[in-house]
Image (cartoon, rainbow, N blue to C red):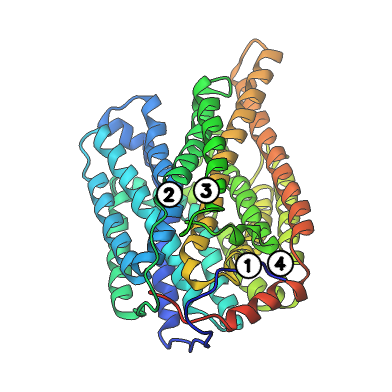
Amino acid sequence: MLSRMPESPTPPTAVAPDRRRWITLVVVGLAQLMVVLDATVVNIALPSAQADLGFSDGGRQWIITAYSLAFGSLLLLGGRLSDLMGRKRTFLIGLVGFALASALGGAAGSFELLVAARALQGAFGALLAPTALAVLTTTFVVPKERARAFGVFGAIAGAGGAVGLLLGGFLTEYLDWRWNLYINVFIAVVAFVGALVFVPSVQRTGPRPKLDLPGTVLVSGALFGIVYGFSNAETAGWDSPLTWGMLSGAAVLLIAFVLWQRRATHPLLPLSIVLDRNRAAAYSSVLIAGAGMFGIFLFVTYYLQVTLGYTPIRTGLAFLPMIGMLVLAAQLGTNLLVPRLGPKVMVPAGMTLGVIGMILLTSLDENSSYAPHILVPLMVLGTAMGTIMPASMQTATLGVDRRFAGVASALVNTSQQVGGSIGTALLNTLAATAAADYLVANAPVTPDVAVQAALSSYATAYWWGAGFFAVGAVLSGLLFRRRNQGLSLANAHLAAEPAPAAV
């Protein structure tokens, strides 16, 4: 049985599907794409931005970290605000704020202003991403249509990083690095108009809940510590006192947050959301997939550009087949396979494909050709992500009281963000250690030895990435309920849910 959620003040009634729901899917999909691709689209523009603004190599990390810190630490707050203020209103505010922050970053004349703009992007992204998923959750109530919608949304979430690499390469090579930020303004304007016209406004029923301020402070501080700690480990190493200080502080705050949620009158995150076995499995799967996925983008990008000498746009194009397989797998999975097999079969199968794809990448060398050596593993990994993400994201929000749809959706984004931070830090550290060990063992260092050291570091990252997916396969296989105990029960619960409170 699903764990019992807080009761709604209104009696259960069925929700009639809105005729505008498919246009709503396009609108929230645009917003999700904008937020996800912004985690990678700026990466390719960094060398040009550094040459233009004149900041140091050490400063480059802050262009990435400023976004991830604000985004990761404020996601649960953003999700809860969407529950409290109304989802349409929160969605529109998030779009406007993200567009303004992007315009500010594009026009930045100094390093400091660019970092501030990236932090603002992250803050408004934390408001926008969970709200987009919550709008989708409360808009699609028919199980078959819900599966189709989450297939599209999950594909966008999984492919956004690769799209960012492609778009970043094109904009940097043919226009200017600033257009990697300006492009968000155009996407946001289209999404804003679409949301204004097509996303329905639903009036709140019942008393207005209050914001859990102590819980918000505790969990935001904990998430900040986790993201900062792993980001610092990536640059300063695991022996840095700041790394362990931030991670230890995050653990203490997280424990305090859980204890507070058990006694809070208006909890930020009702513990029944995460204690449900199916949802716990879904959040874990998103976290593990996020850790593995960031490793794919990071090290394959390095390999293509540094070892094989690909241009930025050619690097982005190299990921296109992966995106295609991800979208295809997401649609086939959510429309045909998940309804029949459930996440207990689909998610472990996707994780297993992730293991295979990562192992195939370990054989790459300086003479590897794109087809088949790079193309095949990327297509396998695209299929893996298209199998994992939609099924996990759909399960993560099934059966949740609509009053908490925003914060439940935020947990999906939080899992992916934290997974990405952990994966990037761990894989970078392991890869750097492998490269250093190879150089020591093969001194003196020649150009050929340096190339082999890089290849050794990439292979090490891929093997550990395969390990991440292997753990995910075992964990999801054990935790997810069988289909007749999981999705079908959750779908029945969803069909009987009360009318939404303030979209």
Which mark sits nearer the N-terminus, 4 or 3? 3
User: Is residue 298 visible in the rendered structure shown here?
Assistant: no
Where does the image place residue 261, in percent across and percent down from the top left? 53, 52
Where does the image place residue 455, in percent across and percent down from the top left? 65, 31
**Mark 1 highlights which residue?**
395
**Which residue occupies the foreground of this view, 386 or 439?**
386
**Secondary element type, mark 1:** helix
Q: Which amino acid is tagged 2?
A: Thr
**Mark 2 highlights which residue?**
216
* Side of 210 where 276 appears, left or right: right
Q: Which amino acid is tagged 4?
A: Pro
Between the residue at mark 1 and the residue at mark 3, the CA separation in whole angstroms equals 26 Å
Residue 210's label in the rendered image is: none
Between the residue at mark 4 and the residue at mark 3, the CA separation in whole angstroms equals 32 Å
Between the residue at mark 3 and the residue at mark 2, the CA separation in whole angstroms equals 10 Å
Which mark sits nearer the N-terminus, 1 or 3? 3
Q: Quadrant of the N terminus?
A: bottom right
**Mark 3 highlights which residue?**
260
Q: Which amino acid is tagged 3?
A: Trp
Between circles 4 and 3, the one closer to the viewer is 3
Where does the image place residue 174, in percent across and percent down from the top left? 33, 49
Between the residue at mark 2 and the residue at mark 1, the CA separation in whole angstroms equals 25 Å
**Mark 4 highlights which residue?**
343
Between circles 1 and 4, the one closer to the viewer is 1
User: Decide: marks 1, 4 in contact (CB < 8 A)?
Assistant: yes
**Secondary element type, mark 3:** helix
